[in-house]
Image (cartoon, grey):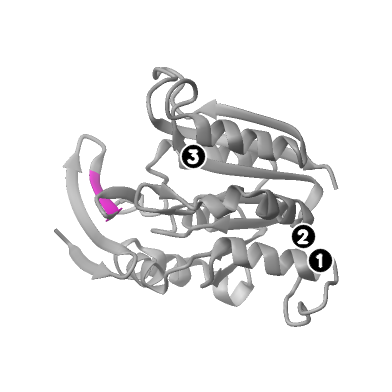
Amino acid sequence: MIFEEEYGFGKVTVTDEMTTEGTIRTLCVNGARESACYVDEGRHFDLRFDYNHEFARLLHETDGGRRVLLIGGAGFSLPKYFISSFSSGTMDVVELHRQMYDIAMKYFFLDELYVSFHPDRTGRLRVIFEDGSSYIDRQSRAVRGLAGAAQAVGREYDIVFDDAFTGRAHDGKMLSEHTVRCICDILKPDGRYAANIISPVDGYGSMQLVLARSTLKNHFKHVKIWQVDPGRDPKERQNCILYARNPRN
């Protein structure tokens, strides 16, 4: 055990494990894995989880995207990969819990990213401590010029990644009708939205995924779901990518 602490949002642990891949450091909240990285020198910014490799594939398809929004920082795996792998583009990370950022800095080599690439000085990485759906609502109001949004800075994003979890629970507000509509407001016309959802693809327990797809179809021209590991039984609970492109507004 490297670290263990109880917070208002749950029990956080950081552990190291020797594997055939090398030493893996894992961040858990209430026993559920939220992030992991390689401890071996030279691999600190490599992605460990398969769903993050799917996010990275979308980044490479869009040449990194000019503006990227990530909801849910945890161990900051994707920001580390993004900044170290692409020479341009910016990423805004919205993380509700400041403690997660501090843990990423101390135990998951986020401090090394700042030393090596200075993303704070270049403006390529911005971290906002706020509820994800609240941030999106505020940015949507700014884009639409609504009253009460004078202090918000409307930003049009190329990609929005949703990885908003506390332990095993995904933030359901992110896939509400209102928040999805607001996501469309802050995306460019060819913008993309991708969410990591842990769910069966079919059968018992897949209702959240089915409802989320239905909501997205109301607001995007193209919506699809795929299994991160296509070899698994679709009825098993697993990581799925819920993907949407081209907002209708």
Q: Label 3, label 2: how many angstroms apart (C-alpha)?
A: 24 Å
Looking at the image, residue 162 lies above or below residue 201: below
Q: Provide the residue designation for mark 3.
A: 197
Q: Residue at x 28, y 53 (%)?
A: 28
Measure the alpha-carbon separation of dots 1 and 3: 28 Å
- As helix, strand or loop, the secondary structure at mark 3 comes to strand
The quarter in which the N terminus is drawn is bottom left
Identify the residue under disc 2: 156
Residue 143 - label: 1
Q: Which residues are magenta?
A: 23-28
Amino acid type shown at disc 3: Ile
Mark found first going from the N terminus, 3 or 2:
2
Q: Position of residue 217 (x, y in %)?
A: 72, 35
Give me the residue at 61% from left, 66% from top: 134
At 42% across and 69% down in the image, what residue appears? 97
Mark 3 Cα shell of 10 Å, populated few (<14), some (14-19), many (≥20): many
The reply to whether dot 1 and dot 2 touch (C-beta < 8 Å) is yes
Along the viewing direction, whichever of 53 and 245 lies nearer the viewer: 245
Disc 1 crowd rating (10 Å Cα; few below 14, some 14-19, many 20+) is some
